[in-house]
Image: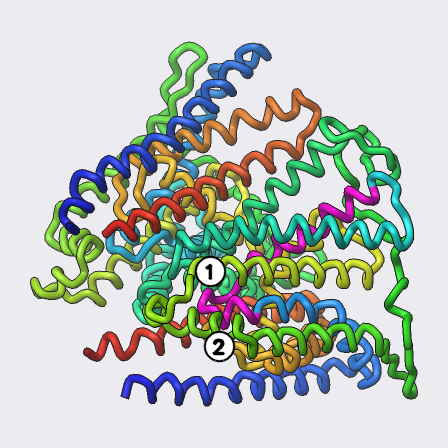
Amino acid sequence: MKAKAPLNCYFNHERIVPAVFLVLSFLAWQISGLTGSFVLNQVITRFIRDGLLVLALIIPVVAGMGLNFSITVGAMAIQTSLLLVIAYNIEGVPGILLVMVIGIFLSVLLGYVLGRILNRVKGKEMITTIIIGFFVNSIYQLIFLVGFGTVIPVFNQEIILTRGIGVRNTVDLGMYRNTIDKLWLFSIGEIQIPLFMILIVLLFAGGIYYILHTRFGRQVQAVGSAAETCAVLGIDTDRVRIKVMILSTVLAALGQFIYLQNIGMFDVYTAHLNTGIISCAALLAGGASIKSAKVRQALLGIFLFHTLFIVSPQAGQHLFRNAALGEYFRSFVAYGTIALALIVNVGNENRPIQRK
Amino acid sequence: MPWRCQGKQGWTMMFNNLIKLPQLIISVFLLVLIAVAWLLQMDMATLFNESLVKLVMNGVLVMSLIPMLNAGVGLNFGLPVGIIGGLLGMCLAVNFRMTGFYGFCMALLFSLAICAALGFIYGLILNRVKGREEIAGTFIGFSFIPFMNFFWTLVPFQNREMLYPIGGQGLRPKISLENYFNHILDNFCVIRLGDLEIPAGLLAFFALLGLFLYWYFHTKVGRAIIATGENEAFSKLSGINISRTRLTAVIISTVIAGVGICVYTQSYGFIQLYDEPLSMAFPAISAILIGGSTGKRAFVFEAVLGTYLLQSIYLLTVPVANQLLIPELTEILRSFITYGIILYALLVRETRRDCR
């Protein structure tokens, strides 16, 4: 009885949510009057930009830790290393490699700390990750708005505010722009397909699929389903959870790097702020829940969610003569998807207990 | 074993970890700031006067957390729900051009009715997500804000002073209360002692609310709320209707939050609509935690103490940061303290629960 009920609702959930998103984004697209090829091009770009960030969420969900809103921490790690490398004027390929190395090192470190923290707050991981995101953001701001130019010497004066303290709001990434984006660029009609980047995202997707089917992946799934059984099986739950957080943070860092180099501009203080929420909403749009997530749901979710995201301001413009309404609609969809997922999932989780 | 853990050891742990450390750090920090302000030869009397106004301005919002905390619903991260109810109440009062005390009282009355209705729905949802109220509340609040942005844009209010000057549709993000009930409580019965101005009317209003809460938790219903928060299973056995008790607590919390934003706004001078309530929950929550609340049980005194400490720090960081020529430092320090305190409390609280 107990096993049957959640399975049933999960089965429905997996299909209904993507279907709703499909209908909504189709309607919004029709109203917006944008051409299909424009939307498709945009969606492909977003797929590349946000793909890895969404994929970073899967493993923590499988491990039963819920949505990991602290992927913003990983994003900030790579941004920190990027700013450091720019501050010391290291250009070209060595620069990119150095950014990766420092970024991964930082995010492994931060992921370990995150894992340790989340092991202390079992059952309340999601609210903790949100607060951690905000908290680390304030430290990040402290470093770059106050620390740069006062405590930390900077050799690249272009990125510093005129007063000599603090980094500018936007930093140009001209020296790294379009280095890998334009590789293997195909055009079919008006649609441009940067095959190399798509393959990279799919490679990571395959990698996560593979990891979930290795011995480590089985351990993660065991941790996610029942912590008690793990103790019997001899799996060190805390260790697995720390590893999961490290993996997720590193993936988020790499994802943010792809995101930034694709845009080519870098909003130092705002680029990372919404990554957590938008990625989580995209994952849920694909039919995942806070208890289970699959790679294909993540990939589907990015397509559906970002289609809606792209067309809704124009749809608002056409429907109400007010583009702001479309903006409100899309933030409502982003927050609302997460809120609804939480209410439905936790509600279903509680129901058998309440009946007893 | 569980007795010992909860009894003596639990108490010492609480004193060592929770009550002493953050309060101590915050108090020392406040003293340092006061010393710096004194050294910079700032007008201490004015600062003191302002600190009293700030205490009540934010204190009512902080008090609104108490009923939910006591009922075991947790920290109310969904504070925006109540805040929006209050904002709507004030907008109605301004729309009907109600001025002075009459206007303020009508605004309170409107928000009372709206918040009671909103609190009822919010409470029903929170009962469904028992055990995960905090994360669900966060996203209910977050998603309610863009939803209400629709409303603010499309609502057919008539008062020109509230609408966008161009186009005449949609409410302004900041509505001035200059002609309505600006500083109505602040300027009520001000006692002047030399340089000191003590807003007696404002403080009396605050004290009245505090006394109401104190009295309420000594009535039968209030005691039932506390019992539910402390031990749900036991309360159920004693014949308390858990769901209804929690619902009552949520409604009271939401109503007081509505009153709180009315008090805040009359001090601030502008009704702030749209995305403004988004981050209002966090300072309020950290205030009650600084006051020494365990995040499981809260007293009126803790709310008052915490608000005074936090708001005095907020107040003092502005001139000090300006003196250091980095104005952004204020905001960064604020968010650092706010989120740091919440994170700390989450960590300590969850660890303490393990002990049981």
Q: Is residue B75 above or below residue B236?
A: above
Q: Residue at x 66, y 66 (%)?
A: A53
Q: Are marks 2 and 1 in contact (CB under 8 Å)?
A: no
User: What secondary structure characterizes most of the magenta part?
Assistant: helix
Mark nearer the viewer, 2 or 1? 2
The answer to whether residue B257 is above or below residue B201 is below
Q: On the picture, is A344 further left or further right than A52?
A: left
In the drawing, does residue B195 fall left or right of residue A54?
A: left
Q: Secondary structure at mark 2?
A: loop
Residue A143 seen in the current view: yes
Residue at screen point 62% across, 77% down: A210
Q: Which residue is mark 1?
A: A126
Which is more toward the observer, B201 or A230?
A230
Residue identifier under label 2: A292
**Label 2 is placed on what type of residue?**
Ser
Q: Element at badge 1?
A: helix
* Rendering coords of residue B347 (x, y %): 40, 47
Is residue B125 visible in the rendered image? The answer is no
Specify the subunit that label 2 lies on. Answer: A
Q: Position of residue B355 (x, y in %)?
A: 26, 49
Residue drawn at x 78%, y 51% as measured from the top left: A99
Magenta-colored span = A58-86
Q: Position of residue A83 (x, y in %)?
A: 78, 44
